[in-house]
Image (cartoon, rainbow, N blue to C red):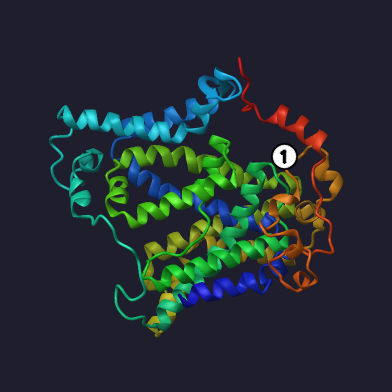
Amino acid sequence: MLAGVIHFLVGATGLVGVLLRFIGPVTIVPTILLIGIYMVTSVTKFAQVHWGISSMTCAIAIILSLYLSKHNMPIPVWTRKKSCHVIRYPLHQVLAILIAIVVGWIFSLVLTECGVFDSATSVNDKLYYARTDTRNYVIKNAKWFQFPYPGQFGLIRFSISAFVGFFLATIVSILDSIGDYYACATTCRVPPPPAHAVNRGIAVEGLCTTLSGAVGCGHGTTTYGGNIGAIGLTKVASRHVFVCVSLVYILFGIIGKFSAVFITIPHPVLGGALIIMFGMFNGVVLSNLQSVDLSSTRNSAIIGTSLLVGLMLPHWIERYPNTVDTGYPDVDDVLKMLLGNPNMVGAILSCFLDNTVPGTPEERGITAWQTVDEEAVSSGNYQEGFEVYQPWLPARVTNASFMTYIPFMPNPKKPVPERHLSVDIGRRKSLVHTIPTGR
């Protein structure tokens, strides 16, 4: 909870906006890419249970989202104006991951009922988690309703070692979130987020982490790279959709029987879905290098060295954990946590090298991230302008003079570049093939 408070203050005080002057694509790409690389372990853990089911799930998602991306489905609809008619919409692409999971789940159910997995009766059997009936007890034992409240798991306590660990995790989370914000902007074809939007995002993450700690939840609130991959695959980036999804999550969190159903999803089905989502995420992360001069030996050396050291040190700590021995157990735990975290190692090294090795802002990609003028916004490179980062507040509030002194709110003295309507419509027609047409 205390780490969440610090997380909130970093965003609310505008400290992140100051750090953005020193953090660019050369720092962010190795940091976030190490997440995708290290997710190989988790994805393999799920997929290796049954490679056939995981491959089928992944293949269905790829076919629906990529191979059939240029095709629209005929969908019958009814409206008061046109009555019954048919529209064409790529619904298969929007629901690609969901369809793949459902089909994989049903296929696992068929194999389970046909006795294919009858030999897997123990958790030590490889195919045990490919069955659909091994965790039904979770649904049976789950409560119908359970609302979280402070103190339900005991009184709030403070531990210095635990705080240091969560504090380091908070720093990594902030760096990850900054990279995810830019990666998500690239996926959604919108301008890079301004400093006030990044500050606001970090502040909200910290606030929600504080609330989750207060009610005893064992997790923080942060961005998730898999969601960026899902956005890229499904082409659904509407904030209204994500608000509705968050409400559904809250509902599932309160109604225990509903949330317990998802625990019964077979592991290979999850593995197949994660393959395509994190594969897309890695591609989006690499796309941030388009503003970097990759012909520069400086940039190539920094990125490559940061990735190598970010993979090497955690592997060394995992294999030889007793090497770190300062004589103080708490210090040893902190050092092991620091050196064993690939994101932290990659972030520190890449940020240090990027800001100490001579290089121009254009060469480093800083200029492209921080300098997006009105002409660039209206040129058709983006589907939306900077108005997407405006808070949902009345104009009389956002234009008030005191907003100038709030780091996580837009400066009313600076005009917000918006897309011109004619350019916007033309660009949408050329880029988005999801505009329904009636018959």
Residue lying furthest right: 375
Relative to 406, 401 lies left or right: right
Q: Against 84, is 199 above or below?
A: below
Image height check: is 77 above or below 229? above
Q: Is residue 339 left or right of residue 408?
A: left
Crowd band around label 1 with a 10 angstrom C-alpha radius: few (<14), some (14–19), many (20+): many
Q: Which residue is mark 1?
A: 383
Q: Residue 356: give x, y in percent of width and height.
A: 74, 67
Residue at position x 43%, y 28% in the image: 59
Q: Nearer the viewer, residue 315 or 215?
A: 215
Nearer to the camera, 264 or 215:
215
Name the residue: 60% across, 20% down: 82
Q: Amino acid at mark 1?
A: Gln
Q: Nearer the viewer, residue 159 or 157?
A: 157
- Give percent across and percent down for residue 294: 73, 46
Q: What residue is shown at x 23% (from left), y 28% (from top)?
A: 110
Q: Is residue 264 left or right of residue 86?
A: left
Residue 370 location, quadrant: bottom right
Q: Secondary structure at mark 1?
A: loop
Q: Position of residue 138 (x, y in %)?
A: 21, 51
- Whether residue 81 appears in this view of the structure is yes
Is 370 above or below relative to 264? Answer: below
